[in-house]
Image: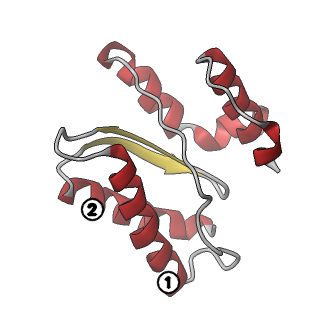
Amino acid sequence: MKKEGRRDLFNYIFGILKNKNCHVYRINGLDDHIHIAIALHPSVSLSSLIKDLKIACGMMIKSKKIYEGFEGWQDGYAAFTHGYSSLDTLVNYIKNQEEHHKKVSFLEEYIRLLKENNIPFDPKYFI
C-alpha cells in the first residue's frame, strides 16, 4: 500500500465505523495488515462489521488504486479484546506500528499472540 494512501484508507475505515456506531480509538497499519482499536457497538456483530469493512474498503482500494497489487483481503481475521485499563497501551502500540514491525515481523507477533491466548492454529495457513 502506498504510504500516502494509508491516510485515505484509514479515514474511510473511520467513517464506516462511525456509521456503525462504533467508537474508534485508533487505526493504523502497514502494507500487509491493519490494526483497529474500537469499542464495538452492542447492535453490531463483529463478523458482519469485518465483512462490511472488507467489501467497502476493497472497492475503495481498487478504485483509488492506493495499493496496486491488491487482489482482495484474506479470508479470515483476528480480533482480540482488551480491558479498558490497557487501552492506552493498546492505542500506543497501534500508533507505533511502523517502528514496532522493524523489530518484530507481523507473522512472528501474530503467532505469539495466538499462543499467548491459547488459540489453536495451523501454520499452513500462514504461507
Image vertical order of residue 25 relative to residue 118, above or below: below
Which residue occupies 63% across, 67% down? 1
Image coordinates of residue 47 in percent, x first then y, are 39, 49
Q: Is residue 123 left or right of residue 44?
A: right
The residue under label 1 is: 64
**Most foreground residue, 67 or 115:** 115
Residue 50: quadrant of the picture = bottom left
Instruction: Point out which mark residue 15 bears.
Output: 2
**Most foreground residue, 126 or 91:** 126
Image coloring type: secondary structure
Image vertical order of residue 107 relative to residue 89, above or below: below
**Would you say residue 105 is visible in this rendering?**
no
Residue 39: quadrant of the picture = top left
Lower sequence index among marks 2 and 1 = 2
Image coordinates of residue 93 in percent, x first then y, are 52, 30
Mark 2–mark 1 distance (CA, rounded to whole Å): 16 Å
**Most foreground residue, 25 or 44:** 44
Which residue occupies 78% across, 46% down? 126
Image coordinates of residue 84 in percent, x first then y, are 30, 18
Which residue occupies 46% across, 79% down? 59
Type of the residue with mark 2 = Gly
Type of the residue with mark 1 = Lys
Question: Badge 1 local density, few (<14 within 10 Å), some, or many (20+)?
Answer: few
Q: Which residue in the rendered view is the most extreme toward the bottom?
A: 63
Residue 96: quadrant of the picture = top right
**Most foreground residue, 76 or 113:** 76
Which residue occupies 21% across, 55% down? 20
- Dot 2: what SS? helix
